[in-house]
């Protein structure tokens, strides 16, 4: 294993991007420095990514696909104005054309380039190519086993979808003056969706695992069976579910993935761009109490091998653990270089982009609520009438009004301190700036999500993580159909 | 300049020939190029300029009933050689699927129709800036507007789809999109809303002043919203939300959802799923239509489908693979619908507002609360309370929920259909849904 790793280390070297091009590294450096001369910031971002998807659906291997993507994005910033140009062709001509495009936008630029960028030697994942570490036949075999296992285990299983998604992304950032920063990022995901049908009723269950390691790190010891069991369990619970209630009530959230609540309710609202533009419901709340005492929320890019972790962000800044809310008080926003400069603070290593086709935006990494000292049991016992939500599909937020939703996929009623029947999936809606003040108990059972989250903003999807302990929310609107 | 047909066809032919040489029994390839130029404004000043030049190629190779695909943005010969080799290798190692095949030859499109989808006009960034200045000046007239963000983009694209049965066709299209997002503020609240215009031809886009004013007006009227109690109440969906409900219907009748059994509309063909008055049409040959096309993603010709006639479901959206599974021929809907719309109802917008003494008018929904398997629907919503046909006050932080099977039967449509998107609906009323609030 070690040997394989050492061999792989040599495959992608820094000169790769210029190897088959008429553009030499020094040509590129000259064009970059000339273009960014009177700009405040900017860089050339080069990216080479390889990804695969192998899908089993309806008893068959439906799709095996491979994709390779190569390109650059050239960015110039003057004061508040960002000019961006990207292309798939890494050539002298193409880079010059982009340069002209940027210059024509920023004609009257009078900035002074900020050469400063923090450095760190820490890495949060290994330099591996997960796609090559497992053969297609091995992947196909596991997918077929998943299908057979689920269909044998429960005769009500009517549909199974399972897939492998693997990726290796190599990036290089060249700044004015030639400073170069690189990163090689592995990412894998393994998902299972199962549909059950019983007495004419259909329900689905979804589960998955993943992160920045090899497939085998997640699938060893037949761990795929646990993924199947969890998807099947969720679907089975939903087969017995009754209509969800409609109206305001107490809500207990389980640990782990339900932290989508934090991502939607406060996470997006604390991204630097919306606060610089004063369009976030949080923009004037810095230093103020935005959550109950005992609530601490961090955004952490430095957890080993996590889906949302990054060694450096997409501007080259090393990532960090940023405290957003400490014991209820708003402490920091998440910043990229542009918004940090304009707000007179520092980048938190949160500048991210989906790929070279997109501009950098401040984004979340792994957003987590830290442990308190209550037990989940205590929370449930304290509720006379409410719901216990364990699993979620996704969420969305209107950062200006602060209203956010998230959709539960596994939930139960709570009656007189006891967990009752499962209820159908429903949307929960709340108000971001006030919801965390309604948190009356924070659990001691913090869990990370299983590594499957993708966050969308301005048309860009980036991998993220969430984590939280169980929490009790005093009052939230549950969007069921039962009045 | 976007790459011309000749360049794209040459790349496509090269790939088909090489795939054949390396052992593919069949293959198909799509090569495309798109160039997009966008200018973004914020608070009457230039904020971003963006130029995007995208080349893309997707190749599918078959060896008998085995199939695999690759895609790339790198069209250099050397890279294509490596990728096609890899694709053939993967195909060999992928299990057979009896339904894998190219489309039937007799279903392939014979012609590229002239649907007037391309406008050769190019607008310089200076002109975009001038448009956005006018837009934002108009959007920020009212003092309550505290932030304006607007955008103007021009897209041009060209593609070639080719397969080893001799199909090789493609065409150019263009789009001009302007949008305005405004934020309004008063003592009690801060709200955001938007308006946009998207056309194939430059001369058809909305006037800048009109667009800015619409966005501002729609935002200001949302200020100081109230939360209402939970109840069963008639809902009126603004056109921009009603089209989403039609979109969910379309995703529930795709042949893949039907053949996999994962749709609440499975086995509903020739059954009544809407009320008598509802007709749904998918029309691919609308001139300048945002969803118009001469053939689908596989090259199969597309004709108008009356998907729902007098409430009865008449067609699924069928592609080649799932069609074979369902024992039906493709109707040219690989990739989904084209210009999909509800035909007009026979009641005016005003009469629709007056149909109930009290109802909610929904202007925005958030969340992904449509479950195509069960038909369950639950989303967050924003809108207005309407009493006796009058807009009373804005409401937010509510959810609306129901099940599509019931919702579809309770739809009443106004007669105000317009073709603003690829999927369009007149203003829609649905009775019997549940609102959750306080």
Image: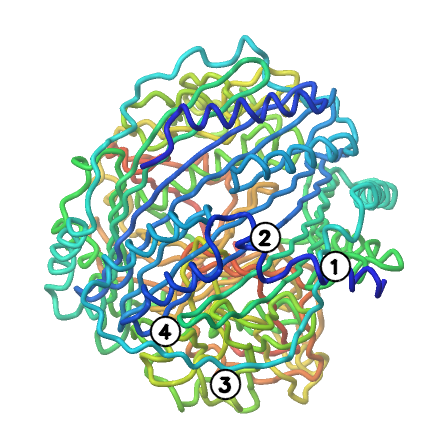
Mark 1 or 2 closer to N-term?
1
What residue is at 63 percent from the left and 62 percent from the top?
A185
Residue B114 position in % (x across, y down): 30, 18
Task: Characterize the local packing of mark 3: few (<14), some (14-19) or many (20 or more) Cα atoms within 10 angstroms.
Answer: many
User: Does residue A483 show up?
Assistant: no
Q: How crowded is mark 1: few (under 14 residues within 10 Å), some or many (20 or more)?
A: some
Q: Is residue A151 above or below residue A425?
A: above
Q: How is the image coloured?
A: rainbow
Question: Looking at the image, which is closer to me, B276 or B343?
Answer: B343
Q: Which quadrant, please, contains the N terminus of chain A?
A: bottom right
Viewer-nearest of labels 2 and 3? 2
What chain does badge 4 belong to? A
Label 4, secondary structure: give it.
helix
- What subunit carries mark 3? A
What residue do we see at 80% from left, 50% from top?
A: A134
The residue depicted at 56 percent of the width and 53 percent of the height is: A48
Same chain letter for marks 1 and 2: yes
Q: Mark 4 points at which residue?
A: A338
> In the rendering, at what x and y percent does residue A332 appear?
45, 84
Q: Which residue is labeled 1 in the image?
A: A8
Residue identified by numbered label 3: A325
Dot label at residue A49? 2
Q: Is mark 3 on a helix, strand or loop?
A: strand
Please identify the quarter of the rendering in which residue A28 is found.
Answer: bottom left
Is the residue under label 1 in contact with that under label 4 (CB below 8 Å)? no
């Amino acid at each position: 294993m070690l040997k394989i790793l050492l061999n792989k280390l040599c495959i992608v070297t820094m000169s790769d991007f210029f190897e088959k091009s008429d553009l030499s590294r020094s040509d590129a450096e000259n064009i970059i420095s000339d273009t960014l001369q009177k700009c405040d910031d900017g860089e050339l971002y080069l990216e080479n990514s390889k990804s695969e998807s192998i899908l089993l659906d309806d008893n068959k291997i439906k799709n095996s696909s491979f994709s390779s993507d190569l390109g650059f994005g050239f960015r110039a910033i003057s004061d508040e104005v960002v000019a961006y140009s990207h292309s798939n062709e890494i050539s002298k001509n193409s880079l010059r054309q982009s340069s002209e495009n940027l210059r024509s936008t920023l004609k009257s630029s009078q900035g002074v380039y900020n050469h400063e960028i923090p450095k760190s030697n820490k890495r949060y994942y290994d330099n591996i190519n997960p796609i090559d570490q497992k053969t297609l036949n091995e992947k196909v075999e596991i997918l077929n086993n998943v299908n057979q296992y689920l269909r044998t285990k429960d005769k009500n299983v009517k549909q199974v979808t399972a897939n492998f998604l693997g990726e290796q992304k190599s990036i290089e950032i060249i700044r004015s003056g030639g400073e170069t920063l690189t990163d090689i990022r592995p990412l894998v995901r393994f998902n299972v969706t199962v549909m059950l049908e019983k007495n004419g009723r259909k329900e689905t269950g979804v589960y998955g695992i993943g992160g920045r390691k090899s497939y085998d790190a997640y699938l060893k010891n037949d761990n795929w069976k646990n993924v199947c069991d969890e998807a099947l369990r969720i679907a089975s619970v939903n087969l017995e579910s009754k209509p969800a209630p409609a109206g305001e009530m107490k809500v207990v959230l389980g640990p782990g993935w339900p932290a989508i609540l934090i991502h939607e309710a406060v996470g997006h609202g604390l991204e630097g761009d919306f606060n610089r533009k004063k369009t976030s419901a949080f923009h004037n709340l810095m230093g103020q109490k935005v959550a109950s005492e005992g609530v601490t929320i961090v955004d952490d890019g430095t957890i080993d091998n996590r889906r949302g972790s990054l060694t450096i962000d997409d501007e080259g800044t090393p990532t960090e653990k940023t405290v957003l809310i400490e014991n209820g008080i708003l402490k920091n926003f998440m910043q990229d270089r542009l918004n940090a400069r304009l707000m007179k603070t520092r980048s938190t290593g949160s500048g991210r982009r989906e790929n070279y086709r997109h501009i950098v935006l401040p984004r979340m990494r792994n957003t987590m609520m830290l442990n308190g000292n209550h037990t989940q049991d205590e929370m449930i016992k304290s509720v006379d009438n409410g719901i216990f939500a364990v699993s979620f599909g996704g969420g969305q937020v209107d950062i200006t009004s602060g209203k956010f939703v998230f959709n539960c996929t596994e939930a139960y009623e709570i009656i007189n301190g006891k967990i009752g029947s499962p209820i159908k999936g429903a949307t929960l809606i709340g108000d971001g700036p006030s919801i965390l003040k309604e948190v009356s108990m924070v659990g001691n059972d913090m869990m990370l999500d299983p590594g499957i989250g993708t966050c969308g903003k301005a048309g860009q999807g980036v991998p993220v993580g969430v984590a939280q302990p169980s929490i009790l929310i005093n009052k939230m609107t549950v969007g069921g159909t039962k009045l | 300049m976007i790459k011309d047909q000749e360049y794209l066809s040459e790349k496509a032919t090269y790939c088909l020939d090489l795939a054949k040489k390396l052992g593919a029994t069949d293959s198909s390839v799509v090569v495309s190029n798109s160039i997009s130029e966008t200018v973004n404004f914020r608070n009457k000043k230039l904020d971003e300029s963006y130029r995007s030049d995208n080349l893309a190629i997707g190749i599918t190779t078959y060896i008998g009933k085995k199939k695999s695909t690759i895609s790339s943005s790198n069209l250099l010969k050397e890279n294509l050689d490596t990728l096609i080799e890899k694709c053939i290798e993967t195909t060999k190692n992928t299990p057979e699927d009896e339904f894998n095949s190219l489309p039937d030859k007799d279903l392939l499109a014979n012609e590229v129709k002239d649907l007037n989808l391309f406008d050769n006009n190019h607008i310089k960034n200076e002109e975009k800036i001038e448009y956005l200045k006018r837009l934002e000046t108009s959007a920020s007239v009212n003092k309550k507007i505290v932030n304006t963000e607007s955008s103007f983009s021009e897209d041009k694209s060209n593609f070639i789809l080719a397969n080893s049965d001799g199909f090789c066709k493609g065409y150019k299209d263009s789009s001009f999109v302007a949008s305005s997002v405004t934020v309004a503020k008063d003592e009690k609240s801060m709200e955001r809303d938007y308006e946009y215009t998207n056309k194939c031809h430059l001369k058809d886009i909305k006037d800048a002043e009109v667009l800015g004013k619409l966005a501002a007006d729609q935002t200001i009227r949302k200020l100081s919203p109230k939360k209402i109690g939970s109840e069963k109440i008639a809902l009126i969906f603004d056109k921009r939300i009603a089209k989403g409900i039609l979109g969910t219907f379309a995703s529930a009748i795709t042949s893949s959802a039907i053949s996999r059994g994962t749709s609440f509309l499975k086995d509903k063909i020739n059954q009544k799923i809407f009320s008598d008055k509802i007709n749904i049409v998918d029309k691919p040959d609308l001139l300048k239509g945002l969803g118009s096309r001469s053939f689908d993603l596989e090259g199969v010709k597309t004709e108008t489908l009356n998907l729902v006639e007098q409430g009865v479901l008449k067609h699924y959206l069928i592609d080649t693979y799932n069609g074979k599974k369902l024992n039906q021929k493709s109707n040219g809907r690989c990739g989904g619908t084209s210009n999909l719309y509800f035909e007009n109802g026979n009641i005016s917008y005003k009469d629709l507002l007056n149909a109930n003494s009290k109802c909610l008018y929904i202007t925005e929904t958030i969340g992904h609360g449509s479950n195509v398997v069960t038909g369950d629907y639950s989303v967050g919503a924003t809108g207005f309370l309407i009493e006796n046909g009058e807009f009373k006050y804005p409401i937010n932080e509510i959810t609306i929920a129901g099940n599509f099977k019931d919702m579809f039967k309770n739809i009443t449509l106004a007669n105000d259909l317009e073709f603003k998107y690829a999927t369009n609906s007149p203003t829609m009323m649905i009775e019997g849904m549940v609102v959750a609030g306080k």
